Image: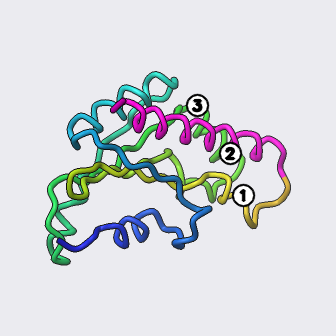
Amino acid sequence: MRSILPILLLLLSFTARAEDLMMVRSTLSFPEAMVTLQNTIRDYGYTLSRVQRVDIGLTSFGFKTDKYRIVFFGKAEENRRMIARRPELVAYLPLKIAIFAEEDDTLLVAANPVKWLEGLVEDEELRIQFERWRNDLQAILEDVRRAEE
């Protein structure tokens, strides 16, 4: 089976620099990790907006997996406020975590929101918001990773 990590990186629209991505590996099965992820997102006060299957398109590239999703979530008012302030953020919101099975493990990957600040004018409110999103994403990912213990 070919690794789907390169496709994941493309889907997240970031280069493969380590500081751009946040990733954890879990020994939970894919279904268990998916349920844990969704519950953890809710526990942090976010609303799930959708879960998108992307494995169907991957099969045309020769990838063999039926366990690949992107979970979209956020806080609607927060997203509206940030997009009104900086319309270019529409490409990044809502927040998203890719989750996929790789052999016996489940991997979860998210883009580091703080990296979105590069190239934006100095804006303290944006910096604080992006750092909070980064901290929440790190905590969510770590909670899913620790759920196996």
Tell me the distance, in whole angstroms, between the alpha carbons under discs 3 and 2: 15 Å
Q: Does residue 36 appear left or right of residue 21 in this picture? A: left
User: Which residue occupies 14% across, 67% down?
Assistant: 64
Q: Is residue 133 above or below residue 45?
A: below
Contact check, label 2 and label 1, Cβ < 8 Å: yes
User: Which residue occupies 29% across, 43% down?
Assistant: 27
Query: Which residue in the protein does label 1 denote?
Result: 117
Amino acid bearing label 2:
Phe
Q: Residue 130 carries which label?
A: 2
* Range covered by the magenta-colored residues: 123-149
Considering the image in quadrants, where does the C terminus appear? top left
Residue 134 at what x, y percent from top left?
62, 44
Tell me the distance, in whole angstroms, between the alpha carbons under discs 2 and 1: 8 Å
Q: Which corner quadrant of the image does residue 81 belong to?
A: top right
Q: Is residue 96 above or below residue 120?
A: above
Query: Which residue in the protein does label 3 denote?
Result: 77
User: Pointer 3: residues within 10 angstroms few (<14), some, or many (20+)?
Assistant: few
User: Pointer 2: residues within 10 angstroms few (<14), some, or many (20+)?
Assistant: some
Residue 127 inside the magenta-drawn segment: yes
User: Pointer 1: residues within 10 angstroms few (<14), some, or many (20+)?
Assistant: some
Magenta: predominant secondary structure element?
A: helix
Residue 125 inside the magenta-drawn segment: yes
Considering the image in quadrants, where does the N terminus appear? bottom left
Q: Is mark 1 on a helix, strand or loop?
A: helix
Q: In this view, does 85 lie above or below 33?
A: below
